[in-house]
Amino acid sequence: MKKLKIAGIVLILFILYVIIGMLVPFVHMKSVSKINKSKIHTEAFYSTSDENGSDRAKIVSDNQEALDLRLDMIRKAKKEIVLSTFDIREGSSSDDIFSELLQASRRGVKVKILVDGLYGTLHMTGKDIFAAVGSEPNVEIRFYNTPNLLKPWTINGCLHDKYIVADHKYLLMGGRNMFDYFLGTHKGKSKGIDREILIVNHGSKDQGAVAQVRTYFKKVWNLKVCKTKFATCAKDTKEKEVKRLRSHAKELRIPDYDYQKITVPTKKTTLVTNPTTIYGKEPIVFETLKQLMLQANQKVFIHTPYAVFSKEMYEGIAQVKKQVPDTTMILNSIASGDNICASADYKKNRSEILDTGISLYEYMGRHSTHGKSLIIDDDIAIVGSYNFDCRSTYVDTETMLVVHGQEITKQLEEDFNGLKKRSLQVKKDGSYQKNKNMTESTMDGRKQGMIKVLSYIIQAFRYLA
């Protein structure tokens, strides 16, 4: 009995150790240092030339097109494919993508795949498809920061970057994770409404967004916290899975895209990233976006799935609204949102967001939106992985591509306007502006109850939401 009591005490102490260790390192939310703030020059994001740059671009919102583009990029690759994502899971889209990656590797293309360690451990470990392809001679899969319960301060720092690069030519970057919820067409299933930007480089391999992303990928890939996984696979398992995937590849009907026709010219493309440490970060992405928004002459339009603001973020958005009266934000309604913690925090703090003065719209569609993008005036389009929440601002790695160009900005604004039509504007008192073409989304009692309870609990941990 005494031994059981001691064991119970030890277990409680260990649980407390894990909880404290995973939370305390992130309590203090840093500000950008004077040195790093001085490195942000908003004029550098604009081209001073009348000539177009080396990059052409396209906004990609359709889930099936997002999958088809990946497959076509992989099929067209001749030397190297680099892929970074927060989350990969088994499913139809993964069968498609990994069958093509296998084919590419066997024709001599080097394939490097970087996945967040927490979600990679949860969703890839023990899955034959990843072991079989990952053990191919020309393929390497690494996890960024695999959590260790004995070192709980490693649990929260996640890789949130999401992009794929083929050779020095093609880049697809945005908010999509790599599984069926975001990729392909799957009847009867829920889906995430997301957005990416396709970049095609028509200049030298050292120019434009592709070169910048490749350099960034190499930096993260070589971090000590990135470890190789799936280096080996049982012979029988590998043979069976490789046979399945090669057969599947023969059945695929992949569109052959004419990238010149489907893209528009841009003036300049610039990659913005957060620090890559697994610990608390200076909010480089947020500060850069804020400085860019403050330079707007006409308007700012933000699309984010969630809004979980720190004090600094409230002040920053209020400052933008004061400088740029036409500042709008669209995000999921509490009912349509698929992130229950973020929705719960929004329920509690929506009035504070309204107090910043921005025009706030809530998306009321059937599915949840997951895109992360901004428009500044009529010539800056920004697309990437960054949510306007504390986790993206202070905890995770993030990538945002800033594109100077009127045609691509027009594409993004058309996409925004489509979401806006399926949204309701929130008035200062928290009620909705009447709209005969759109009704308020509703949620079942179970979700409503969970959000109500969580809206209070999450306040103690909102710096991780």
Image (cartoon, rainbow, N blue to C red):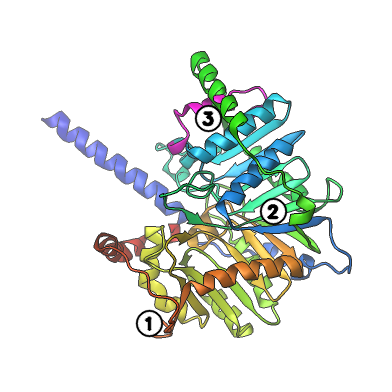
Give the total number of marks visible in the rendering: 3
Does residue 448 lie above or below 433 as drawn?
above
Pointer 1 or 2: first along the chain: 2
- Residue positioned most to the top: 235
Quadrant location, the N terminus: top left
Asked if residue 146 lies in the magenta stretch, the reply is no
Residue 72 appears left or right of 87: right
Name the amino acid, label 2.
Answer: Leu
User: Residue, x 31% and y 46% (percent of image)?
Assistant: 16
Mark 3 lies on a secondary structure that is helix
Disc sitting over residue 198 in the figure: 2
User: Residue, x 48% and y 75% (percent of image)?
Assistant: 361
User: Residue, x 71% and y 82% (percent of image)?
Assistant: 297
Mark 1 lies on a secondary structure that is loop
Please state which of residues 58 and 394 is positioned toward the viewer in this rendering. 58
What's the CA distance linking mark 1 and mark 2? 38 Å
Q: Which residue is mark 1?
A: 431
What's the CA distance linking mark 2 and mark 3? 26 Å
Residue 179: x and y, percent?
A: 50, 43
Is residue 265 visible to the viewer in this orientation of the structure?
A: yes
User: Residue, x 56% and y 52% (percent of image)?
Assistant: 63
Name the amino acid, label 3.
Answer: Phe
Is residue 226 visible to the viewer in this orientation of the structure?
A: no
* Magenta stretch bounds: 122-140
Asked if residue 128 lies in the magenta stretch, the reply is yes
